[in-house]
Image (cartoon, rainbow, N blue to C red):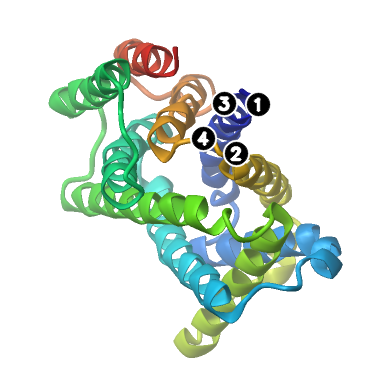
Amino acid sequence: MLWVWLVLLYGIIKGAREVVKKKSMERNTVVEVLFVYTLLSFLFVAPGAPKAGGVEWHTMLLIALKSFVIFVAWILSFKAIKKLPVSLYGLLDLSRVIFSTLMGVIFLKEMMTSWQIAGLALVCAGLFLYRFRRGAGEEFSEKADTKMICFALLSCLLNGVSGTMDKVLMQTVTSTQLQFWYMLFLVLFYALYLMFSRTKIKLGSAFKNYWIWILSVLFVIGDKALFIANQSGNSKVTIMTLLKQAGCVVTILAGKFLFKEKNIAYKLFCAAVIIAGIVIAVL
């Protein structure tokens, strides 16, 4: 069951990444962080280039499509996390459970046991409990926050698409091949975005922002663990999606201790319901 531990590692790292994203954008703009973060991440995986060859053209097109999906998802999620409380974003991010599970069942024909369905129900219950209470003590800025919540949810949908594609792609390529080409396409997409939008960025300032370096390292390690887990014949998108949600505890605790956010006790209760669902689904 190595894949279970790898996905749990990814989930914890993912939660830490959301915190680091918010910290990195205290010093630089969304676009600056995105471009430098992506470029650094690619440079970290570039030494694997000699082992990245041999990918068929139709698979390469699928990898490029996955990269484009993530390119859009990251723009939306970075904008959302910059404006929203990190603990709220962490819980909104759990909506990807619904999207990814549906995709795993519909497109990959995965079957869910009664325990897994019960676990999914608890995870969804934890999410909706928080959404139902939304506004009780939280500080929102009217229409802007509604827009950012929509951005966060759309990002979750796109990440669900990407997660389903990972499972398909890892049947024909290695983790090294996928990570190298995926990151290369991402760098190209962000470079084209900067060129056509004529967005000016301060590269010097961004490269000096150590939070971006930390973000890149966490991203490379987390994705490597996830891609290896996807190679396992026993792994399922439906279960992996639930395991990834362990990161919500990281964002909630960071909200309290780093960003001094409110309603942490209630958020932890919601997170406990979610974690209980994960445990039931896995066991």
User: Residue shown at 58%/75% (left/top)?
Assistant: 60
- Label 2 packing within 10 angstroms: few (<14), some (14-19), many (20+): some
User: Residue shown at 28%/24% (left/top)?
Assistant: 120
Q: Is residue 242 left or right of residue 143?
A: right
Check residue 235 in the rendering and tell me which mark sits there, or answer none. Answer: 4
- The reply to whether callout 1 and callout 3 are in contact (CB within 8 Å) is yes
Front residue of 267/204: it is 267
The answer to whether residue 215 is seen in the rendering is yes
Q: Cα distance, mark 1 to mark 3?
A: 5 Å
Q: Amino acid at mark 4?
A: Ser
Q: Quadrant of residue 47?
A: bottom right
Q: Which residue is mark 1?
A: 2
Q: Is residue 267 above or below residue 22?
A: above
- The reply to whether callout 2 and callout 1 are in contact (CB within 8 Å) is yes
Q: Cα distance, mark 4 to mark 2?
A: 5 Å
Q: Cα distance, mark 4 to mark 1?
A: 10 Å
Spot occupied by residue 101 in the image (x, y as percentages of width and height): 31, 39
Front residue of 114/177: it is 114
Q: Is residue 178 above or below residue 55?
A: above
Check residue 232 in the rendering and tell me which mark sits there, or answer none. Answer: 2
